[in-house]
Image (tube, helix red, strand yellow):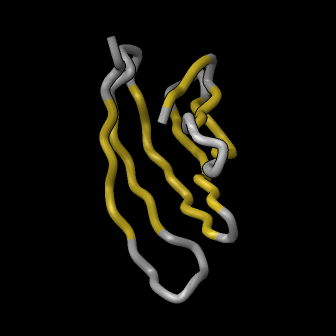
Amino acid sequence: MQIKDSDASVPSDEINVDGGVSQSGTVQATIIKGANRVPIAGTLDAKGSGSGTWHTSGGIVSCSGSWSAKRAG
């Protein structure tokens, strides 16, 4: 996933990201692929590092996990 100017995106035509990062570093978004929706939440610091959680929404199987991020070169 890439974040630029507070907007999140995935470099793929099949995956959409709705949401982004606030000025304070709060991450609030939903990754969407077809009928599948995965809400993510967390925080990033001023250097672009951070962590958070994700969970599936709807569908047959429920699952959740965590994520971490670092600013790319």
Q: Return the x and y of residue 3 as percentages of the image width and height.
A: 53, 26
Which one is nearer the viewer's eye here, 51 or 38?
38
Q: Is residue 37 above or below residue 4?
A: below
Q: Residue furthest top?
A: 73
Position of the C terminus by quadrant? top left
Q: Residue at x 33, y 48 (%)?
A: 67
Image-based side of 21 in relation to 68, left or right: right
Q: Residue at x 58, y 53 (%)?
A: 31
Q: Residue furthest front?
A: 13
Q: Quadrant of residue 54?
A: bottom left
Q: Residue furthest bottom?
A: 60
Q: Return the x and y of residue 46 as percentages of the image width and height.
A: 41, 15
Q: Is residue 41 above or below residue 63?
A: above
Q: Residue at x 33, y 41 (%)?
A: 51
Q: Quadrant of residue 62?
A: bottom left
Image-based side of 22 in relation to 45, left or right: right
Q: Return the x and y of residue 30 as percentages of the image width and height.
A: 61, 53
Q: Return the x and y of residue 7 as percentages of the image width and height.
A: 64, 28
Q: Residue at x 63, y 57 (%)?
A: 32
Label tally? 0
